Amino acid sequence: MGFRGLAHFERTLGVEAGVPILVSTNESVTDIVRYLAAESKRQEEFPEGIAGAVASLSRKADAPMAGYLFVYLTRHLISRNMELETSLLGKMISNPSVPPSARKSIGESMMVNYYYLSPQSRAVLIGHFVDLSLQSEDQASTMGFRGLAHITDFFHDEVDAMIAPSTRIKLANAYRTNVLSRKLLKNEFLGKLLGVQSDLEAKPQPLGPRAK
């Protein structure tokens, strides 16, 4: 069962978010669900242990646990603590237990949470997206720039003040390279933030065959 398994169960079967259920006769899947059911019970009895559970992902690759924790953090908590949730999601998004394809779901949750965070937590979140943007892995870099673009659309001056000049140069180079190689769509908010809009306009890239 992959990272999205528990979220899929929740959508299709209407079970309570974050609570695994036994739905398969496949032995390996059954073992995973039982394992996650035990973790669910531990979280119910000791919710303060959620940070330790996230930290455990760095010690041992565990994609099913990462999927469970994502669902638990974003949907299970009755009274959501946005500061804690975003902090833990930030630690998960680049974790080796999280498949690259699953970073989109985590990143989107972090983007939404930005509006509810303290200034300090907002700066940490932007730092996570900056780090992702500078990664060589395409999906990670795309998610990082997408997060920066979304937040900059609403909070340009705030984000602008958070990025150091040396980091801005690295981001600008990465953004320019990704756009010109067609790995990333040009974005007016990022172009303005990074000061590369005019560079890209001077070297337009065709999006496909010219219409006849």
Image (cartoon, helix red, strand yellow):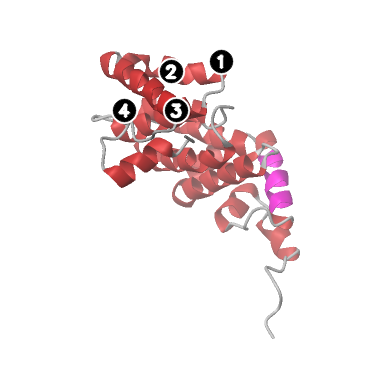
Q: Earlier in the sequence, mark 2 or mark 4?
A: 2
Image height of 146 relative to 61, above or below: below
Where disc 2 sits, the SS reads helix
Q: CA distance from mark 4 to mark 1?
A: 25 Å
Of the pair 106 and 123, the residue shown nearer to us: 106
Task: Give, as a single range, the part of the protein colored magenta.
Answer: 168-178
Q: Secondary structure at mark 1?
A: helix
Q: Residue at x 42, y 40 (%)?
A: 109
Label 4 or label 1, whichever comes before in sequence order? 1
Disc on res. 167: none
In reply to whether residue 10 is colored magenta, the answer given is: no
User: Which residue type carries mark 2?
Assistant: Ala
Q: Which mark is residue 59?
A: 1
Q: Which residue is mark 3?
A: 27
Q: Which residue is mark 2?
A: 53
Gap in Å between the C-alphas at discs 1 and 2?
Answer: 10 Å
Q: Earlier in the sequence, mark 1 or mark 3?
A: 3
Which mark, by number, is residue 81?
Answer: 4
Check disc 4 and give the amino acid type: Asn
